[in-house]
Amino acid sequence: MRTRKVNMIISLVTIMGGMALVVACGQRNATTVIEGDAAEQVYIAPGEYDEFYAFLSGGFSGQITVYGLPSGRLLREVPVFSQYPENGYGYSEESKPMFNTSYGFVPWDDSHHIELSQQNGEFDGRWLFVNGNNTPRIARVDLSTFETVEILEIPDVAGLHCAPFITENSEYLVSGTRFSIPIPQKDVPIDTYKENFKGLINYVSLDQDHGTMELAFQIEMPGFNYDLARNGKAVSHGWSFLTTYNSEQAHSLLEVNASQKDKDLMAIINWKKAEEYVAAGKFTERPTSYYHNLMDESTGIAHSQEMKMTRILKPEDCPEMVYFIPVPKSPHGCDVDPSGEYIVGNGKLSADMSVYSFSKIMKAIEEKNFDGEIEGIPVINYDAGLHGILQKPGLGPLHTEFDERGNAYTTFFISSEVVKWNVDNLEILDREATFYSPGHLVIPGGETRKPEGKYLVAMNKITKDRYLPTGPELAHSAQLFDISGDKMKLLLDFPTKGEPHYAQAIRADKVKPNSKKFYNIEENAHPYATLGESKTKVVREGDEVHVYMTAMRSHLAPDNIEGFKVGDKVFFHVTNLEQDWDVPHGFAIQGATNAELLVMPGQTKTLLWEPKKVGVYAFYCTDFCSALHQEMSGYARVSAK
Ligand code: CUK
């Protein structure tokens, strides 16, 4: 988003000078819109719970954050594509394998889109999926523990921005490459883009009981930029919609090259048909390399597996599987309404928004109402698939969510507002300023068949004067609106972490009852678990030393350890023997070059320590756990080799 802002603004100002008025109207003063009982509506009394969980992606922080709504209180930060010193994720020996990729150990990524698991088009509160944009990956967070338990790399794509969009019974996560590349990778001149660069759309299947991901198949596509997607629901179940930009196939995305055409294209995929082709063996197997990292539930240890083959479906071998339809210039998303009938395709560089009708698209396909084809893929006639056009809604439309009353809500980045409109008759009903320049927005269930149109959160890209200044770097800002009435009402600003792009929100009672309180120590199958203080020991195997340690209020055992040598690799395997909610213990040792561990009751976690100098070094529990917490410590003596 960030690098495109300036170009977008320049072109929109030139293209739509006449609409500059909307920009001016957008900059209203917040104090004029806060009225009545806003404070009461967001106030959650001490000891009370919020009504919704909201999960915000962290953008370049690589994490996700969990907020309560309507209070806007930050409840948790869940590390996904980033090492996290607060709990040792990515530093502990158990979690390090989560970052294995075909490029090596990559403990950072850029996370954009959150998808909660669904059944029958409704959130079921089991898992959350999120993409890693840069080193293409998809992660799964288990909502009983709020921990990242799986990361799957997606091969032969670049920039997995268009991910991970879920189907209504959690059959698949669909994703597409943001940047087309040579497949397989090879050393070719960049200006051979048109001949050598290809795109891939990927279908990852989900195990219905465990949520585990598997790359089911990939569809080879023309070398466009696949930006965002949604899957059909209800009447359109079985189909995916992906917007693309740069249908010019320019290898430089300067506006003069990549935004010449008046329209770009939306890809429409019949994934049920694709499944049939896979079952009929119509794919080619292509050698590749990607990693699948999975946390074992009983040991808490992540294991990596390198995968070496992928199945490719080619549209030319698989008729009636892939179509295109034109969308307004430089689109950024295609959102499907709760009925599954309407698909909103917006162009960032267009003054209008196109709303498509799924049944009309089906009719056009049936009647072969095509305007030619691109690389063998039929292009459906634009007017034949159109439900209608939303005229001059605002400047720079980005994302749309829905309520259960037939309304859509779209963010406008440039005119800095949220616009409410009726999906059926395309009438604009309300507009509210946001502060400033919103990207995504979220309504609880707002992309499902069952939205709960009570609140809307706009996630703004620019903060400016909203908070006390904190130097040049400001937290991004989210804004909560009450959308239960005819007019939207701004209730609250709250700061966010990293750069949230998409978010999803779910009724708290769908997640809260399954939330794990602690790990049952009898089920701890970690090979270095120490299930009782009498079983603690120190075992040397050559230069490797394994310390079987326990933590219990208020001591670490063993506490004073001698016999380490300079150059040893010391593994502290710390088992937290507590069996009670909210009694973690921590572990840190002087000179360790990684972080600390935070060990939940019943868990075993391992910290690697490589002493470099002789001496006596202190270790201690990092999480204040009892009145004698400060006594929870010990010494490690290191002698010359
Ligand atoms: S994106 Cu950032 S505001 Cu990555 Cu879905 Cu549109």
Image: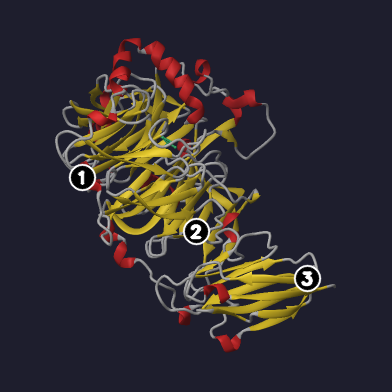
Q: Which mark is residue 150?
A: 2
Q: Quadrant of residue 403?
A: top left
The percent position of residue 346, horizontal first and vertical second, equals 34, 27
Asked if 69 appears above or below 185 in the picture, the reply is below
**Do we see residue 442 in this rendering?**
yes
Q: Secondary structure at mark 1?
A: loop
Find disc 1 in the rendering and name its residue: 454
Farthest bottom residue in view: 534
- Which amino acid type corresponds to the residue marked 1 in the rendered image? Lys
Q: What whole-number distance in Å separates the C-alpha atoms at marks 3 and 1?
A: 61 Å
Is label 1's Cβ within 8 Å of ligand 1? no
Whole-percent x and y of residue 109?
Answer: 55, 45
In the picture as drawn, the residue positioned furthest to the right comes out as: 641
Q: Quadrant of residue 380?
A: top left
**In the figure, is residue 248 to the left or right of 559?**
left
Marked residue nearer the N-terminal end (2 or 3): 2
- The label on residue 615 is 3
Q: How many marks?
A: 3
Q: Residue at x 35, y 13 (%)?
A: 16
- Tag 3: amino acid: Gly
Q: Residues within 10 Å of mark 3 (few under 14, many from 20)?
A: some
The one of 80 and 423 positioned closer to us in this rendering: 80
Q: Residues within 10 Å of mark 1 (few under 14, many from 20)?
A: some
Q: Do the residues under discs 2 and 3 have CB atoms within 8 angstroms? A: no
Work out how far the residue at label 2 is from the one at label 1, CA to CA, in angstroms.
Answer: 33 Å
Q: Nearer the viewer, residue 294 or 616?
A: 616
